[in-house]
C-alpha cells in the first residue's frame, strides 16, 4: 500500500530545504521514512546519536543531518533543524483524504440549513435545520450534523462524525472519524426509587485550529457551554464531560477522561489515560504525566504525576521508596533484633 | 449557538415553580445557566454558600434560592429544593433532537422486519429481518439494526448506533451515538500454534429506562445473554464484555471496563475508569471510587476504592502512609542512629 | 430474543462430538448455554468441580463432562476436552451476520476502485479510488473505505468501519463496528506560539487472521507503517498510535493504549487498560497484567505487572507490603518506645 508516484532528486530536495548537499545530487528520493526504516528510495533524519545509529544500520537513500556534530557515510542534507526539515518533506507528500467539491446528491439536507458556496459535503451526510456550513468547510461521508450547528471556514469533519445540535466547530478545526460531540451530559439524581435524568440543554463550542481525535466524546453542557478553546489538540478515545472548559493550546493524549465542570487552563499537557475529577480547576502551564488522577485544584504551573497527582519529583521519590519497601522491612527486622540484644545485655 | 427564542417573566417562572418571588416580576428570563455564568437573560440556582459566591460575582438576571439561609441582592425565587427547581426549568427548555415521524424513504428495511405504526426511523437506516421496532420508538439516521432485534416502546437510538443481532432494547431506553451493542465477545484459545476464535452465539438484553453513553461497547454473550437490568445508566466509552450482568439502577461512569462474565448487583455506582476482573461478583449497594480495580468478589455493601479495591477508609489510610514514606525512612534512620549510640555506650 | 429454531437429540450430539452418552438419547437440545444457566433445552459443560456445582444447581437438559472425575445426575456426554466440545456446539449454531451477496445498489463506489467477483458490499458503503476489495471479502453497511486500500480475501468489515486511506486488511481479518483505522497520528510541535501539526503521510498494515474489536482506533504512521502482524487479536476501545508495531499472535484486552512507535513482540498478552509508553520495545512472550504501565523496554519473556511494570511476583510482594504499612508504622512506634526505655535505663 503506497501513495501514487512522486519524487525528487536529492539535489532538488537540498534546494527546497535550503540545506547543504553532501553526496551525489541525482540520488532519487521518493518518500520520507522513519529513522531505522530500510527503503532505498527513502529519506530520513537524525537529530542525535541515537537516531543516527538506527539510520546507519538501515538501507536508506539519504539522511538529513544537523549542521554539525553528526557524521554519516550516506548521502545527506545538512540543515539547521533536521526534524523540522523532515516535517517539511512530510508536508510536500501529504495529501488530503479525497472529497469532491460541492454537495453530493445523496445528502439529506434540511431546507432550513445554509450551505455556503465552496463548502464540500460528501456522500450520505444528513444536515439538519438552522445549521450553517461555511465556505471551505469539508464534511466527509456519513456525517450527521444536527440542528443549529455552525461549521466554520476550513473546518473538517472526517467520515462518521456526529454532532447532536447547538455545536460550533471553529475555523480550520479537524474532527476525526467516530467523534461524537454534543451527546447528553451524564446527569441523574436518585429520587428514592430510581435514577432520573437531568435534562441537558446546553451546547458545545470548539474553537479555531483545534483537533479532536478519532472516537472521542465531547458532551454538551447541562446548561451553558462545554468549551474547548483555540488551538487545543485532543487525541483518540478521550472523554470530555458536560460543562468542561479547556484553555488554548492545550494537548490531551489518548484515553484521558475529564469529568463534569472541570476547568483546564491554557498550554496544559496531559499524557495518556489521565483522569480529572469533576469541578476541579487546573491553572495554565501544567504538565500531567500519563495515568495521573487530578482530584484537587492545581494552582501552580509545573509537572505533576500520580494518583492522586502530586509534584512529579516528589512522586518519583515516593515511588522509589515503595520499590524499597522489601529492604525497609528487613531493616526494621534488623533493628528489632539489635534492640532485643541490647535489652538482653542490659538486663 | 443558541436554541430558538423562548422565555418567561420572573413572575411566570415563580408561579410555575410554586416559589416565592423576591424582586420585580417582569424581569425577562430566557434560559437556565450554570452558577457563575454571566447572562443578563439567564437564571441560575444556589443551594449553598459556595454556589452563591459564584452567582454573586456573575451578571445574571435572577437566582433560585433555598427557602432560608442564603441572601442575594439579585431578583430571586425561593424554593424548597433549588436544584430540583432548576431541573424543572431545564425540562421546560429541553427539546428532543429533531426526527420526522414515519420511515424516511432512504431506509433499507428487510421485508421480514416489523415496524409498528408510530415508530420513527430517520434517513439512511438499515434494519434487518425478524427485527421489531415498537410504536413510539425513535431510530435516528445511520443506525444499523441487525436481525432478530427488539426495539421497545419509546426507546431511542441516536444517530450512528450499531446493534449486531439478537439485541433487545427496553422501553424508554436511550442509546447514544457511536454505541456498538452485540459485537463478538473477546474469546480465543491457543491451539499450540495460534489463537482460535470461540464462536459467540449469545445475545444482549438491555432493560427499560436505561441509558447507554456515546461510544460504549456492549458485547454479546458467548452463549446465553449479556444483560443490563432496568434503570441502569452507563456513561461514554465504557466496555461491557460478554456475559456480564448488571443489576437495576446502577450507574457506571466513563471509560470503565467490565470483563467477561462479571456479575454486578443493583444500585452499584462506579466512578470513572473503574476496572472489573472477569467472573468477579459484586453485591448490591456497592460504591466504587474512580480508577478502582475489583479483582475479587465484593460481598458487603459499602464504599471501596483503589487497585486492588479495598474498603475506602482503609485505602485512604494506606494512601496517607504512602505519602509519609519519606518521613518513615528518616525515622528509621534516626532509630538506627540511636541504637548505634546505645550499642557504643553499653560496650 | 433468540435465534430461529435449531436442535439435535442428545444422541445426535454425542455422535457429532464423538463422546460417550449417559442418559436418554432422545433428550432434545436446542442451544448451548453457560454453566449455571437454566434452560430446559440447553446443554452446558463442566470442566471442573466449580463449574459442576453451578450446573447441578441449574435446570439444564444435559451437560458435557470430562471422561472421568466428575459425576452428574443429569443426562451427559463425556468428552476428552469438555470446553473444546462445547466450542464445537457453539460453532454448530453460530451464524454470520446477514449480508446479501454482491454490491448493494446504494453503494457509492469510485470507478477507479476494483471490487472482485465474490465480494459482498452492503447498503450505503463508500469506496474510494485505487482501492481493491478481494473475492470473499464482506463489507457491511455504512463502511467508508478511503483511497488506496486493500481488503483481502475473506476479510470482514462490520457495519460502520472507517478506513482513511492506504490501509491494508489481511485475509480473514475481522474488523468490528466503530473501528477507525488510519486517522492522523497525534503529532504536533510547539512553534513558540502554538502547536503545529506534523503531517501524517504513512499507512497501516493489518495482517491475516487478526481481529480488531469495536470502537478501536489504529492511527496511520507519520511516515512508514503502523503494523499489526498475523493472528493478533485486539479487543474493544483500544488505542494503537502511529508507527506502532505488534508481533504475531498477540492478544490485547479492552481499553489498552499503545503510544507512538512502540514495538511489541509476538505472543505478547495484555490485560485490560494497559498503557505502553511511546518508543518502548517489548520482546516476545511477555504477559502484562491489567492496568500495567510499561515505561521502559522489556527484554526478558515473563509476567509483568504494575505501574511502572515490574516482575509480577516482585510486584505482588511490594503490594502486600503496602497493605502492611499500618502495621509497619506501629512496629516502628514500638521500636521507638523500646529504644527510649533502653536509653532511660542506661542513663
Image (tube, coloured by chain):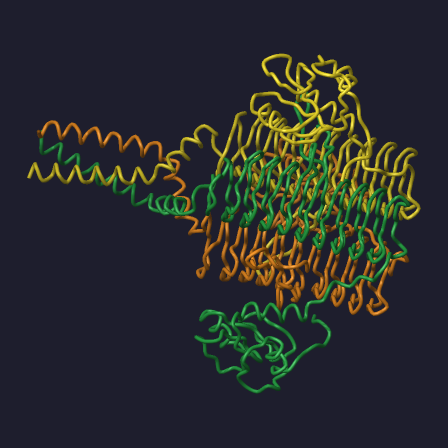
Chain colours: A orange, B green, C yellow
Q: Is residue B158 above or below residue B217?
A: below
Identify which residue, A23 or C84, lies in the foreground: C84
Q: Is residue A5 left or right of residue C18?
A: right
Q: Residue at x 66, y 63 (%)?
A: A206
Q: Which one is in front, B307 or A20? A: B307
Task: State which quadrant residue A334 falls in.
Answer: top left
Q: Position of residue A86 (x, y in %)?
A: 67, 47
- In which quadrant will I find the N terminus of chain A? top right
Residue B344: % across, % down = 12, 32
The picture quadrant where one finds residue A152 is bottom right
Q: Which of C82 and C181 lies nearest the eye of the viewer?
A: C82
Work out whether residue C146 can be spotted.
no
In the image, residue A159 sits, relative to residue B259, either above or below, namely below
For the residue pair A157 and B247, the one nearer the viewer reads as B247
Above or below, A205 against A5 in this view is: below
Q: Residue furthest left?
A: C347
Amino acid at each position: 500500500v503506497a501513495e501514487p508516484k512522486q519524487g525528487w532528486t536529492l539535489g532538488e530536495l537540498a534546494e527546497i530545504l535550503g540545506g547543504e548537499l553532501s553526496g551525489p545530487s541525482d540520488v532519487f528520493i521518493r518518500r520520507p521514512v522513519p529513522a531505522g526504516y530500510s527503503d532505498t528510495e527513502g529519506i530520513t533524519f537524525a537529530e542525535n546519536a541515537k537516531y543516527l545509529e538506527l539510520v546507519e544500520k538501515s538501507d536508506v537513500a539519504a539522511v538529513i543531518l544537523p549542521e554539525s556534530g553528526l557524521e554519516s557515510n550516506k548521502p545527506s542534507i545538512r540543515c539547521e533543524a533536521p526534524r523540522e526539515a523532515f516535517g517539511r518533506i512530510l508536508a510536500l507528500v501529504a495529501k488530503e483524504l479525497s472529497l469532491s467539491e460541492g454537495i453530493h446528491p445523496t445528502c439529506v439536507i434540511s431546507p432550513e440549513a445554509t450551505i455556503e458556496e465552496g463548502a464540500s459535503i460528501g456522500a450520505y451526510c444528513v444536515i439538519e435545520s438552522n445549521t450553517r456550513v461555511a465556505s471551505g468547510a469539508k464534511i466527509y461521508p456519513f456525517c450527521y450534523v444536527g440542528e443549529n450547528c455552525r461549521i466554520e471556514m476550513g473546518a473538517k469533519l472526517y467520515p462518521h462524525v456526529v454532532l447532536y445540535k447547538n455545536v460550533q466547530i471553529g475555523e480550520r478545526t479537524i474532527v476525526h472519524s467516530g467523534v461524537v460531540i454534543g451527546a447528553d451530559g451524564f446527569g441523574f439524581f436518585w429520587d428514592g426509587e430510581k435514577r432520573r435524568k437531568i435534562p441537558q440543554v446546553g451546547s458545545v463550542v470548539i474553537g479555531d485550529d483545534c483537533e479532536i481525535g478519532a472516537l472521542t466524546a465531547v458532551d454538551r453542557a447541562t446548561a451553558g457551554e462545554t468549551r474547548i478553546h483555540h488551538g487545543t489538540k485532543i487525541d483518540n478515545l478521550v472523554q470530555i464531560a458536560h460543562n468542561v472548559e479547556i484553555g488554548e493550546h492545550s494537548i490531551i493524549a489518548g484515553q484521558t477522561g475529564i469529568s463534569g465542570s472541570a476547568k483546564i487552563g491554557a498550554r496544559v499537557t496531559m499524557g495518556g489515560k489521565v483522569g480529572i475529577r469533576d469541578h476541579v480547576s487546573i491553572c495554565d502551564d501544567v504538565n500531567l504525566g500519563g495515568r495521573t488522577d487530578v482530584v484537587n485544584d492545581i494552582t501552580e504551573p509545573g509537572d505533576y504525576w500520580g494518583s492522586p497527582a502530586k509534584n512529579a519529583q516528589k512522586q518519583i521519590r515516593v515511588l522509589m521508596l515503595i520499590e524499597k519497601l522489601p529492604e525497609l522491612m528487613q531493616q526494621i527486622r534488623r533493628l528489632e533484633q539489635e534492640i532485643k540484644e541490647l535489652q538482653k545485655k542490659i538486663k
